[in-house]
Amino acid sequence: MSEDNVILRVDHLVKYFPIKRGIIIQKQIGAVHAVDDVSFEVKRGETLGLVGESGCGKSTTGRTILQLYRPTSGSVIYDGVDLVKLKGEDLRHMRRKMQMIFQDPYASLNPRMTVGEIVGEPLIIHKIASQKEVEEHVNNLLELVGLNPSFASRYPHEFSGGQRQRIGVARALALQPALIICDEPISALDVSIQAQVVNLLEDLQNQFNLTYLFIAHDLSMVRHISKRVAVMYLGVLVEMTSRDNLYSTPLHPYTQALLSAVPIPDPVADEKRQRTILVGDVPTPVNPPSGCRFRTRCPIAVPLCAESRPEFRELRPDHFVACFLAK
């Protein structure tokens, strides 16, 4: 991958949340291993899908990239600058170039602020526009996401979930960022609305050459919007490749199990395909398994899987996998 074309590089990213006991004197007794040595790159103008079960660390990865959570270790290189080393005004300046669309359109909008105030707030905080200019910017942004500019004087509770998410998209676009992290932006929406929001994101990407990290657990939607897909399990990446490679020839047993559970519209083909049923529950991130994280549920695990952690290696051109038995 050309270094000039890489807008985001995540190297050995680790985020542990401490578990403490005590009221007056608190002592750390453990840690939640939310993200554990994750590395990947995102090209300028592409969409990288990040998929996995709930609780696997997808959203934490996204928030740690933006430094909403400070990482335990590792580096996040955005446009040649290590965000981990930035603080204060320097970090605030870099945040103009990166924004986030949050999962819950009901919780992510302040109910006491009007739509105009919500969308215009980033412009005022970062001193992009004066108070008089904000109104014009807000009207343009609302039109851009398919909303009537007259909605600017209304409050979030007056809108549906899909409309609220469009407001969230308008807020994310206010500072004209190059990178947007979409944290499951459609999971809380009705199925009929999901396609509209995804199509809007694609149109905006084409119009402004945006780069997306699209976090989701809906594999069919990720296939539609992403150019490359990374699969995450219990805080680690297990596979990453192009969309077509992943869906046609998945190499990791966990990816194969995920894809076997995706509904397909052909009942005859659905009847013939072989399902991979995983046994047991996802282990706790407080005390993850030794070696390969997936070994406790893997149908092909061998003793080696418990002894050491498999390297995240390039098994085929641009096809990375963390599995001793993948071929």
Image (tube, rainbow, N blue to C red):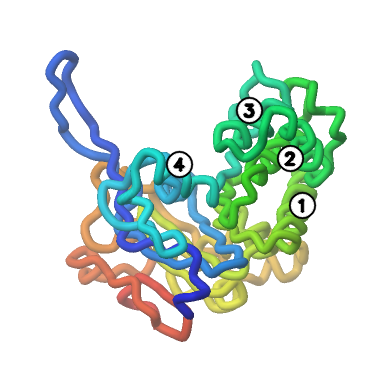
| Label 3 to label 1: alpha-carbon separation | 19 Å
Q: Are marks 3 and 1 in contact (CB under 8 Å)?
A: no
Residue at 34% across, 42% down: 87
Question: Is label 4 or label 2 in front?
Answer: 4
3 or 1: tag closer to the N-terminus: 3
Residue picked out by circle 3? 109
4 or 3: tag closer to the N-terminus: 4
2 or 3: tag closer to the N-terminus: 3
Residue picked out by circle 2? 166
Residue at 42% across, 75% down: 320
The quadrant of the rendering that contains the C terminus is bottom left
| Label 2 to label 1: alpha-carbon separation | 9 Å
Q: How packed is label 4: few (under 14 Cα within 10 Å), some, or many (20 or more)?
A: few
Residue picked out by circle 4? 92
Amino acid marked by disc 4: Arg
Q: Position of residue 7 (x, y in %)?
A: 50, 65
2 or 1: tag closer to the N-terminus: 2
Residue 132 in view, yes or no: yes
Amino acid marked by disc 1: Leu
| Label 4 to label 2: alpha-carbon separation | 24 Å
Q: Is residue 223 left or right of residue 155?
A: left
Amino acid marked by disc 2: Arg
Residue picked out by circle 1? 200
